[in-house]
């Protein structure tokens, strides 16, 4: 019985450990990017963005949390442009377009 409880605890801990790509995907889906495109973008953005750029994406997702309408990649890029990071905007657009194909 003790072993089962320990195994269940380990399983719950591992379930909470999402990779950066999975967290990016989840955030993109939350702001309205279609699931398939978000999954593709998550993998690519994880590899290409710095930690501070990833935080900018996270801030945007939290900021959009109460909005009803969905955002497209272009809408996300426009919001990120306000942060003053043109490299992030360019990478987001490049990745978004690449994941549509």
Image (cartoon, rainbow, N blue to C red):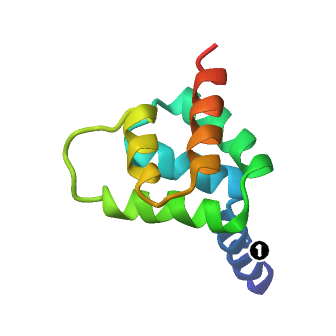
Q: For this rendering, which residue is in front, 7 or 14?
A: 14
Instruction: Place residue 36 in its image quadrant.
Output: top right
Instruction: Assign the C terminus to one quadrant of the image.
Output: top right
Q: Position of residue 96 (x, y in %)?
A: 58, 30
**Which residue is located at x 62 percent, y 60 percent?**
54
Q: Where is residue 11 in the image (x, y as percent from the top left)?
A: 71, 68
- Left or right, 98 with respect to 57, comes to right
Classify mark 1: helix, strand or loop. Answer: helix
Query: Is 77 rendered above or below residue 17?
Result: above
* Residue that lies at the very extreme toward the top in this rendered image: 101
Instruction: Assign the N terminus to one quadrant of the image.
Output: bottom right
Query: Is 31 rendered above or below residue 98?
Result: below
Q: Where is residue 63 in the image (x, y as percent from the top left)?
A: 33, 62
- Left or right, 48 with respect to 72, comes to right
**Which residue is located at x 70 percent, y 67 percent?**
51
* Residue that lies at the very extreme toward the left in this rendered image: 68
């Amino acid at each position: 019985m003790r072993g089962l409880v320990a195994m269940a605890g380990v399983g719950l801990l591992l379930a909470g450990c999402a990779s950066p790509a999975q967290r990016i995907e989840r955030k993109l889906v939350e702001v309205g990017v279609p699931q398939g495109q978000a999954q593709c973008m998550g993998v690519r953005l994880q590899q290409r963005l710095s930690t501070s750029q990833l935080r900018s994406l996270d801030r945007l997702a939290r900021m959009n949390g109460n909005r009803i309408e969905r955002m497209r990649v272009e809408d996300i890029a426009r919001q990120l442009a306000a942060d003053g990071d043109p490299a992030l905007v360019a990478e987001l657009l490049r990745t978004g377009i690449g994941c549509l194909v």
